[in-house]
Amino acid sequence: QSRQTQSQPGLTTQEVEKIESELGITLSAEEKLNIASIAKAPASATWRTAAENRIEYYRKADLNIEVIDEVGNPLPDATVSVKTKQNAFKFGGIMKAIDFGNHGGQVSDPE
């Protein structure tokens, strides 16, 4: 028996399988059903477009790196590896609504 409704489609079988694969876990049939019943926001939701625009503006930037030798000559075919040592934002943590609010405790849109 499906818990999904027409107005709130749930996750597809492929999306549930992707979750299993990406997390390296095996879910029971009941767990798969529970996860599949999660309602998703419509792909065209206006909040999603606004969020993607903020991500592009605030969290992304172009970076040019020029690798040079000890004399200062460019090394055009150099391989560069970068590893993040620390995130600049809370990631995967538990947050309260107050974390998103202004000093008066009101939750507000950052724009």
Image: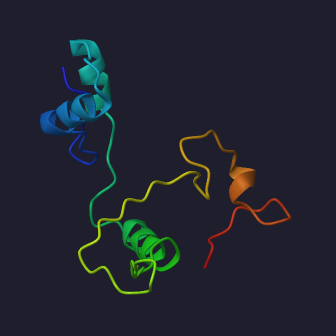
Position in image of residue 96 (x %, y %): 69, 45
Residue in view at x 29 percent, y 58 percent: 42
Residue 10 vertical placement versus 34 (above, below):
below
Q: In the displayed structure, does residue 92 sit left or right of residue 104?
A: left
- Figure quadrant of the C terminus: bottom right
Q: Is residue 73 left or right of residue 12?
A: right
Residue 32 in which image quadrant: top left
Q: Position of residue 101 (x, y in %)?
A: 74, 61
Which residue is farthest front?
71
Indicate the position of residue 91 as horizontal and vertical percent values. Answer: 55, 47
Image position of 16 (left or right of 88): left
Task: Pick the residue in front: 53 or 62.
Answer: 62
Which of the 4 image quadrants contains residue 68? bottom left
Q: Would you say 105 lies left or right of 25 here?
A: right
Q: Residue furthest left?
A: 14
Coordinates of residue 110 in the picture (x, y in percent): 63, 73
- Quick check: 20 above or below 103? above
Q: Along the line of sight, which residue is nearer the eye, 39 or 20?
A: 20
The quadrant holding residue 80 is bottom left
Above or below — where is 8 with respect to 31? below
Q: Residue at x 22, y 31 (%)?
A: 21
Q: Which quadrant is home to the N terminus?
A: top left
Q: Residue at x 23, y 74 (%)?
A: 77
Foreground of the two, 48 or 54 = 54
Q: Please name whichever residue, 93 or 51, is drawn nearer the observer in this view of the structure.
A: 93
